[in-house]
């Protein structure tokens, strides 16, 4: 009994795949408290449940700010997020307090890149619209001018943020016969050579691309990057796809661009807020395909993410090297 009292306390903010829970429970290192639900923990419960913990395993939908860190108190050594994105963490404050952060890069790159390609094709070839027409009786005949979209062959694709996922998307799109691959970001990337991508200014990328894919991190610099000025520079026939974070896009400006015919179509896996209210204007547009943030959602990927985040947490508790530590 005495041993149990000495175990470090961790709080897991949601039900996670069993692979992750197994790592934690079998470690014998910590006493796990779980928000045993598939739905998010209310803020008040989060503040209460983190009190006195040594480690928090959280999700991208949990805002881990100064209030949460204060509520946890001085024991807190590690925050492990079940995501590669970390815009939900108050990194400056976390760093100031010497708390370590684990995250899940690489293991979700393939799943997210695959989903991005699926979303791009679904949007460009109007697949959800077609499925709907079959169901609602709109399919009267094979019609030469009906449900035409845009193909990748011979096209120019622009990737905003050629990081792990951006590169994996580029690799997958090239074999579709893409003629030019452009990318923009803070600095040119050596890995661009592999896919023959050209580093260009954002303006050039926006005005020359037939398909624009956003795969950068959400930062103060990228927040609202895709706005009225951005959409007004796009080709009228171009397709916009975002699988990074919703806040990179100004959704009012996107609505305007889509509804006025300024751009052809958009595919979004991420929105602001999440979930998007069911009466949101973007959902009324046929040329906007919206998914519920499922980029990394394969059984295997989510299991590996859970395992990695659990191992990151344990390493943070024991003061050893994490499999994937975020450099703050
Ligand atoms: P990386 O860090 O490998 O890539 C992010 C890229 O964004 C880097 O190349 C970075 O360039 C670039 N970037 C930073 N600032 C800018 C800018 N101002 N303009 C253009 N590019 C910029 O991360 P990942 O590829 O692993 O993940 C990217 C993002 O994808 C995550 O942060 C997350 O938000 C999102 N994501 C979404 C998923 C989903 O389910 N839809 C699943 C997984 C991730 P530099 O190195 O020069 O800073
Ligand atoms: C992430 O990891 O940042 C994604 O958004 C979900 O997998």
Image (tube, rainbow, N blue to C red):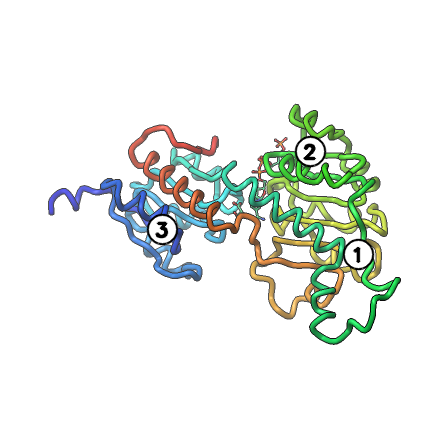
- Residue 18's tag is 3
Is tag 1's residue or tag 2's residue first in the polypeptide sequence?
A: 2
Is residue 272 shown left or right of residue 309? right
Circles 2 and 3, Cβ within 8 Å, touching? The answer is: no
Distance, label 1 to label 2, CA atoms, is 23 Å
Q: Nearer the viewer, residue 277 or 18?
A: 18
Toward which corner of the image does residue 293 lie, by quadrant? bottom right
- Residue 185's tag is 2
Q: Is residue 237 above or below residue 102?
A: below
Q: Sort mark 2 into few (<14), some (14-19) or many (20+) by Cα contacts within 10 Å.
A: some
Residue 253 in picture, x, y percent from top left: 75, 55
Indicate the secondary structure of the residue bearing disc 2.
Answer: loop
Is tag 2's residue or tag 3's residue first in the polypeptide sequence?
A: 3
The response on whether ligand 1 sits within 8 Å of label 1 is no
Q: Residue at x 36, y 47 (%)?
A: 19
Q: Residue furthest left?
A: 1
Q: Sort mark 1 into few (<14), some (14-19) or many (20+) by Cα contacts within 10 Å.
A: many
Q: Residue at x 83, y 46 (%)?
A: 233
Toward which corner of the image does residue 156 lie, by quadrant? top right
Residue 207 in picture, x, y percent from top left: 83, 41
Q: Residue at x 69, y 73 (%)?
A: 135
Q: Is residue 248 above or below residue 96?
A: below
Is residue 1 shown left or right of residue 65? left
The response on whether ligand 1 sits within 8 Å of label 2 is yes
- Residue 99's tag is none
Residue 287 in picture, x, y percent from top left: 76, 60
Distance, label 2 to label 3, CA atoms, is 37 Å
Is residue 80 shown left or right of residue 236? left
- Residue 257's tag is 1
Q: Residue at x 70, y 53 (%)?
A: 250
């Amino acid at each position: 009994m005495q041993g149990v009292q000495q175990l470090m306390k961790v709080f897991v903010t949601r039900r996670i795949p069993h692979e992750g829970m197994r790592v934690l429970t079998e470690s014998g290192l910590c006493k796990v408290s779980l928000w045993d639900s598939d739905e998010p923990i209310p803020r008040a419960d989060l503040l209460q449940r983190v009190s006195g913990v040594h480690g928090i395993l959280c999700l991208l939908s949990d805002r881990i700010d100064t209030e949460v860190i204060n509520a946890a108190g001085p024991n807190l050594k590690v925050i492990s997020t079940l995501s590669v994105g970390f815009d939900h963490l108050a990194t400056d404050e976390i760093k100031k307090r010497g708390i370590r952060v684990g995250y899940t890069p690489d293991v979700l790159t393939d799943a997210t890149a695959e989903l991005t390609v699926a979303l791009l094709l679904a949007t460009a070839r109007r697949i959800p619209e077609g499925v709907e027409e079959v169901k609602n009786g709109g399919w009267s005949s094979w019609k030469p001018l009906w449900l035409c979209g845009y193909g990748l062959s011979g096209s120019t694709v622009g990737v905003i943020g050629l990081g792990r996922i951006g590169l994996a998307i580029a690799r997958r799109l090239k074999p579709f016969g893409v003629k030019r691959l452009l990318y923009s970001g803070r600095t040119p990337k050596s890995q661009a050579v592999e896919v023959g991508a050209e580093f260009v200014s954002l303006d050039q990328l926006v005005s020359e691309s037939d398909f624009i894919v956003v795969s950068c991190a959400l930062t103060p610099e990228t927040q609202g990057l895709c706005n009225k000025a951005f959409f007004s520079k796009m080709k009228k026939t171009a397709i916009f796809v975002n699988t990074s974070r919703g806040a990179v896009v100004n959704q009012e400006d996107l609505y305007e661009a889509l509804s006025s015919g300024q751009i052809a179509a958009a595919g979004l896996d991420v929105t602001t807020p999440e979930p998007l209210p069911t009466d949101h204007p973007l959902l009324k547009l046929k040329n906007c395909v919206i998914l519920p943030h499922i980029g990394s959602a394969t059984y295997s990927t989510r299991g590996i993410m859970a395992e990695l985040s659990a191992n990151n947490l344990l390493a943070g508790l024991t003061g050893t090297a994490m499999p994937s530590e975020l450099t703050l």
